[in-house]
Image (cartoon, rainbow, N blue to C red):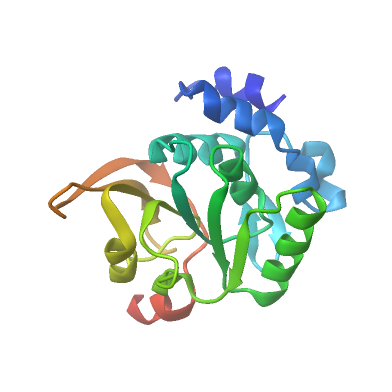
Amino acid sequence: MVRDALANYPYHRIHDQRVLEAMRQVPRHKFVPPSLQAVAYQNYPLSIGYGQTISQPFIVAHMTELLEIKPGDKILEIGTGSGYQAAVLSELTPYVYTIEIVEELGKQAAQLLHRLGYETIRVKIGDGYEGWPEEAPFDGIIVTCAPDDIPPPLIEQIKPGGRIVIPMGNPWETQVLVLVEKDKKGNIKKTRQYEVRFVPMTGKAQRYLP
């Protein structure tokens, strides 16, 4: 159901068949409240409580595709939410690390992922602005909440040749999805993708909002 919706999305298409297969394998309805399970596979974001949302399927798939994950890559997610994005990532590599600042959400996601058999995903309660320095460096970092600018610790924690996919912009202005690439010499290239709407990154990132 998700796969068909993505293949026919009118504005963008997902070309990586591995990503489409990962989306097909993960039961999205398990990651939304019972009252929303009937619309879990529709292509729009849904509330998961605590002022947070689960991103629409296309955004999940496209952000995942932009990372260009290879088997064995080490991936960091900022903003666990319900755990859905982490589950999709783990279909592509067993080395997934995810950070959630809302303690109750993080605990719920960890329990759900364990219950569904995603045993290799590591969940941490903390401020995603700081990344996960103890486990760095990472081949890819995906951010599911929007800071006003890219947190410097995330730039430091991405490997040369690695990628960061991140929405940027404060909640009162236009947000843009950005692909950040670090070359082998450590140089940074930023490529704007398209306008998006994400919940703001909280914690330390909030200090930099106007």
Position of the N terminus by quadrant: top right
The image quadrant of residue 206 is bottom left
Looking at the image, which is closer to me, 173 or 84? 84
Residue ID at (54%, 59%): 97
x and y percentages locating residue 139 in the rendered image = 37, 49
Q: Give the position of the C terminus as an image quadrant.
A: bottom left
Q: Is residue 185 left or right of residue 33?
A: left
Can residue 210 be seen here? The reply is no
- Taking depth in this image into account, of 155 and 8 the one nearest to the observer is 155
> Would you identify the image quadrant in which residue 83 lies?
bottom right
Q: Among all residues in the image, which is located at the extreme right?
A: 34
Find the residue positioned furthest to the front: 72
Q: Residue at x 72, y 74 (%)?
A: 104
Horizontal side of residue 149 vs 171, given as left or right: left
Vertical comparison of 75 with 123: above or below:
above
How many circles with numbers are drawn on the protein? 0
Q: Is residue 183 visible?
A: yes
Query: Along the line of sight, which residue is nearer the eye, 63 or 11?
Result: 63
Q: Position of residue 115 (x, y in %)?
A: 82, 54
Q: Position of residue 173 (x, y in %)?
A: 37, 59
The image shows residue 88 at horizontal and vertical percentages of: 61, 41
Quick check: 53 left or right of 135?
right
**Residue that appears at 38% across and 44% down:** 195
Which residue is at the front of the view, 132 or 34? Answer: 132
